[in-house]
Amino acid sequence: MQNPTRRRALSIFAGALATAAAAPVAAGGALYRWQGIALGARATIVLDHPEAPALARRARAEIARLEAIFSLYRADSALARLNRDGRLVAPPPELLACLSLAQRLGAVTGGLFDPFVQPLWALHARHAVEGTAPTAADLAQALGRPRWEGTRLAPDAIVLPAGAALTLNGIAQGWIADRVAALLRAEGLDDVLVDTGEFRALGGDPRGGDWAVDLAAPAGKVGAVRLRDAALASSAVLGTTFDAAGRMGHILDPRTGLPGAPRWRLVSVTAPDAAVADALSTAFCLMERPAIEAALARVQGARLAWLG
C-alpha cells in the first residue's frame, strides 16, 4: 500500500527504479481506452461500447471512492485514519472485507502476506532518505509490534492493537480492479479489461479471442498470458527498490524485517479475483516453490502464470 514517506524516499531514486508490470498486447481494431491513476499507479480500462466515455467516467468515480478508503497518501482516507487513531468506527464495508481477505490470505501463506509491515515500511523509508540502514534494534522494535492478535474486525468498528499500523500494498490495487469490473458488469458489459496495476478481465477481447497480456520483469518481457473471466497479478522483489543501486527491493519479509531476497525475477498469478492474485503474487516472492504450491492448493482457482 502506498506510504507517503515511502513515496518521498523512492522518488529520490526514481532514475534507478525498474517496474514489474504487465501491459495489454497491441492488436488490430479500435477499442475505447481510458487511462488514469489509481492509488498512485497507472490505470487503464479497455472496452467496446457506444457509451464508453460515460461508462469510463463512472468507473473513475468508483476508483476515486475506493481511493478515499484505501489510500495512505491521503490523510483523510479510512485506512489512514485507522492507522492514526487505532480505531475506526462504522468502517466502510470495503475496508472490512478487504482486511478479512488479507487475514485469510495471510494464513494461507504462512504469515508472509502481512499488512502489519507498515511500521517496517516507515523505518526503511526513513533510512533510505537518510542514506543509512536500520539497526538490528530498530528492526526488532518494528517486528515486535502486534499484528492480528488483538485486532478487532467488526461492522461497528475496526480496532488495532497499540502500536500497530496497516498497509494494504499487495491487495488494494487488485481489490479496486475487482470492484471496477463488478461495476461495469452491472452496467451490462461482458468484455472489459481493467488494469489498476493488476488485471481483471471480464469475458474476452471483443475483437475475438482472449485478452492478451504481456508479462514483464525488471529486465524486460518474459512471457505472455491470455485472460478470459480471470485476474492476473505480478510482483517482483526488485520491481521497485529503496536504494539507488537497485539491490534493496520493496517487498519486506515479515520474518526478518528486511527486503526479501530476489529469489524470483517475477511472480505472476492468475485467480478468479484480482485481490487474491495480488496478495498471492506478493507473498510468493518470499517463498520457495514447494511452499508456493502448498498455498495454491488452498486457494480455489489460483494458478501460477509465471515463476522464474
Image: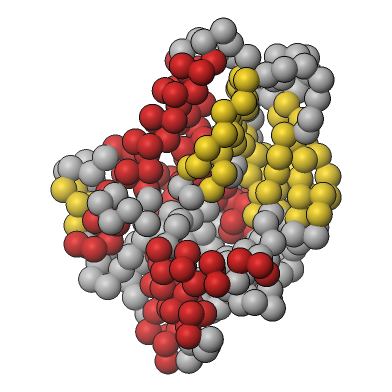
**Residue 122's x, y, as percent?**
41, 73
At horizontal 51% and vertical 18% (from top left) the residue drawn is 53
At horizontal 77% and vertical 40% (from top left) the residue drawn is 214
Q: Nearer the viewer, residue 88 or 149?
A: 88
Residue 38 appears anywhere in the view: yes
At horizontal 45% and vertical 57% (from top left) the residue drawn is 2
Q: Nearer the viewer, residue 199 or 207?
A: 207
Query: Does residue 227 lie above or below 280 as drawn?
Result: above
**Residue 236's x, y, as percent?**
67, 59
Specify how the rendered protein is coloured: secondary structure
Q: Nearer the viewer, residue 233 or 75?
A: 75
State the image quarter where residue 288 is shown. bottom right
At horizontal 37% and vertical 84% (from top left) the residue drawn is 141
Q: Which quadrant of the rendered structure holds the N terminus? A: bottom left
285 relative to 57 in the view: left or right: right
144 relative to 160 in the view: left or right: right
State the image quarter where residue 259 is shown. bottom right
188 relative to 79 in the view: left or right: right
**Residue 108's x, y, as percent?**
53, 53
Q: Which quadrant of the rendered structure holds the C terminus? A: bottom right
Query: Does residue 31 lie above or below 88 as drawn?
Result: above
**Residue 189's x, y, as percent?**
55, 13
Residue 276 appears anywhere in the view: no
Q: How many marks?
A: 0
Query: Does residue 217 lie above or below 59 as drawn?
Result: below
